[in-house]
Amino acid sequence: MFDANLDTLTYSLKKVGAHNVEIIVGEIGWPTDGHKQTNAKMVQKFYTRLLKKIASNQGTPLHPGYIEVYSFSLTDENSKSIAPGNFDRHWGIFRYDDQPKYPLDFSGQENEKMSVDAKHVKYMSHQWCALKDDVKSLKTMKGNLDYTCGLGDCTTLSNGRTCNKLSERMKLSYAFNMYFQMNEQCVEACDFNGAAKTTK
């Protein structure tokens, strides 16, 4: 598909007389979550093949030689608009917290290994926000779920996504915690009218 797209553009440019236009692929990638056709294993396969192709310097039939490409993207973006789809926050090779998602060899030699964590990242305390065990009626929590998902990131909870098989209690804890983390673990961001608690 990559060859077909690049060669279609190359052919079209030559057809209109633009023979010497330098072509650079400004964005190329694949999301790891937010859609039923996405997962880390598939993305790892995509990048392994792409990086091998780029490293070979063979190019495509109509664009032989080196191809300059830029990955989209280095890290996930947990505040990006999801108007195009829930997948739009999950294009990164690294998660929001700069942790690698899958083994990869950037040299294209297929010697996959986990990338080194980003250095000098100041991480927050290892604490989370969770639904209290004594909350029995989950129906009363719908407003809280809508609120946290509206201001946090619940793109992995919807149908066909990574975390959609969690129980309703676990989904609430996930949403509460995402909101809590995105608000820098502020105590007030883990209350929800007494329904939530911080935990280690």
Image: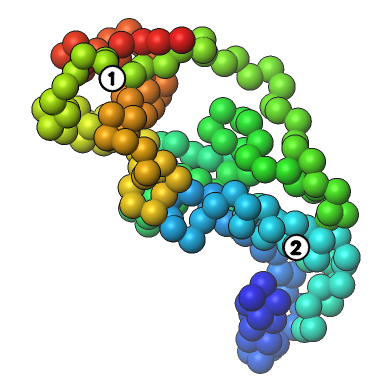
x, y percentage for residue 56?
88, 65
Q: What residue is drawn where x is 84% and y is 54%?
A: 110
Would you say 19 lies left or right of 84 here? right
Q: Is residue 18 visible?
A: no
Would you say 167 lies left or right of 78 here? left
Q: Nearer the viewer, residue 140 or 9?
A: 140
Instruction: Classify residue 164 by image quadrant.
Output: top left
SS state under label 1: strand
Mark toward the start of the polypeptide (1 vs 2): 2
What's the amino acid at mark 2?
Arg
Question: Residue 131, relative to residue 5: is it above or below?
Answer: above
Q: What residue is drawn where x is 51% and y is 56%?
A: 38
Q: Which residue is mark 2?
A: 49
SS state under label 2: helix
Callout 1: 10 Å neighbours few (<14), some, many (20+)? many
Instruction: Classify residue 147 by image quadrant.
Output: top left
* Disc number for residue 131: 1
x, y percentage for residue 153?
37, 36
Q: What residue is drawn where x is 26% and y is 16%?
A: 133
Instruction: Classify residue 59 by image quadrant.
Output: bottom right
Q: What residue is drawn where x is 71% and y is 28%?
A: 117
Can you name the residue that lies furthest to the bottom here?
15
Q: Is residue 110 visible?
A: yes
x, y percentage for residue 14?
70, 87
